[in-house]
Image: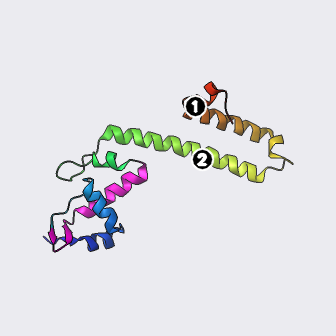
Amino acid sequence: MKFLDIGEVSARSGIKPSALRYYEEIGLIASVFRHGLRRQFSPDVLLQLKLIAMGKTAGFSLEEIAGMFGTNGAPDLPRAVLHRKADEIDRQIRELSALSDTLRHVAECPAPSHLECPTFRRLLDVAGKRAGAGKGGQAARRGGGV
């Protein structure tokens, strides 16, 4: 089997060697041995790095991602956790889509002042309720708000 040194892994994955060393330090990846001072990795590390990148993009912490690898470095992806994360992403997509619609309305609204626009006022009310709900209602309890 041909092993990859840290420079090759970095070049193929686009991840800086310092990040690779950090990932190894926290147990996300493991080098097989060293050739001189250079860490050597199994080619399987490239798949692990792709999974780590996908996990980071999905919003998982490095600690959560580390928990998704078995002791041998093979992925052990918990389906229930993945479903919950997908549901969270779907919720974020809906919220961002509503925000995008609001911004487009504000940009195109012919009202002399956005605060005079009933649609904009309604959208502000909805956004304010979402923000209060997202903070567990803390703003409402403190008497604060938008």
Is residue 40 one of those drawn in magenta?
Answer: yes
What residue sits right under mark 1 in the picture? 133
Q: Nearer the viewer, residue 36 or 93?
A: 36
Residue 91 magenta-highlighted: no
In the rendered structure, which amino acid carries the disc numbered 2? Ser
Q: Is the Cβ of the residue at disc 2 closer than 8 Å to that at disc 1?
A: no
Q: Position of residue 71 (x, y in %)?
A: 18, 49
Q: Earlier in the sequence, mark 2 or mark 1?
A: 2
Q: Is residue 144 above or below residue 25?
A: above
Question: Given the current orientation, which residue lies at the most extreme left position?
Answer: 1
Between circles 2 and 1, the one closer to the viewer is 1
Amino acid residing under circle 1: Ala
Q: Secondary structure at mark 1?
A: helix
User: Residue 140: x and y, percent?
Assistant: 63, 27
Classed neighbour count for the residue bearing mark 2: other residues with Cα under 10 Å, few (<14), some (14–19), many (≥20): few
Residue at 75% across / 42% down in the picture? 120
Q: In this view of the protein, which residue sits in the foreground, 33 or 42?
A: 33
Span colored in magenta: 34-59
What residue lies at 38% left-to-right and 40% top-to-bottom? 83
Name the residue carrying label 2.
97
Instruction: Label 2: state its secondary structure.
Output: helix
Separation of residues labelled 2 and 1 (CA atoms): 18 Å
Looking at this rendering, what residue extends furthest in the top direction?
141
Q: Position of residue 17 (x, y in %)?
A: 31, 68
Which quadrant holds the N terminus? Answer: bottom left
Pinpoint residue 58: horizontal percent, then vertical percent.
Answer: 42, 50
